[in-house]
Amino acid sequence: MTTPDLPLDPRDMRKRIMRAAYRGERLDGKHGLTVSIAHAVLRTAEHAGYSGEDTMTMLAYHAILQLEQMQDLLTEQVSLTPSPPMVFIK
């Protein structure tokens, strides 16, 4: 499956986020299970009565936080992965 064109319109982005959150679809259009941070955040914001702007701020915050955690994990995994010794040949 090809990756869909990236939405340029914020309304289209919001529609895709909502679809991903409530239908379990991935934003990149690929098949597979998705652990939806969007679903958890949107449900929490809805329950708390947040405005649309506050909901999207909360979603952006948690998405960036998760990205930072994943980058840290990836960096840790790369640094722990043994690499072959370097051999210099003249």
Image (cartoon, rainbow, N blue to C red):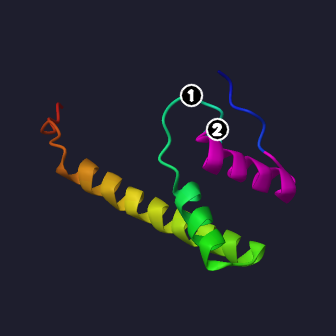
Quickly name the residue at label 2. Answer: 28
Neighbourhood count class around disc 1 (C-alpha, 10 Å): few under 14, some 14–19, many 20 upward: few
Quickly name the residue at label 1. Answer: 31
- Magenta span: helix, strand or loop, mainly? helix
Q: Nearer the viewer, residue 11 or 70?
A: 11
* Residue drawn at the location 56% of the way across and 69% of the way down: 44
* Residue drawn at the location 76% of the way across and 72% of the way down: 52
Residue 34: image location, x then y, percent: 50, 41
Q: Quadrant of the C terminus?
A: top left
Residue 87, picture quadrant: top left
Q: Is residue 81 magenta?
A: no
Front tag of 1 and 2: 1
Q: Which mark is residue 81?
A: none
Residue 30: image location, x then y, percent: 60, 30
What's the amino acid at mark 1? His
- Total marks in image: 2
* Residue drawn at the location 23% of the way across and 53% of the way down: 79
At numbered mark 1, what does the secondary structure look like: helix, strand or loop? loop
At numbered mark 2, what does the secondary structure look like: helix, strand or loop? loop
- Magenta highlight range: 7-25
Q: Is residue 84 above or below residue 64?
A: above
* Residue drawn at the location 83% of the way across and 58% of the way down: 10
Neighbourhood count class around disc 2 (C-alpha, 10 Å): few under 14, some 14–19, many 20 upward: some
Residue 75: image location, x then y, percent: 32, 56
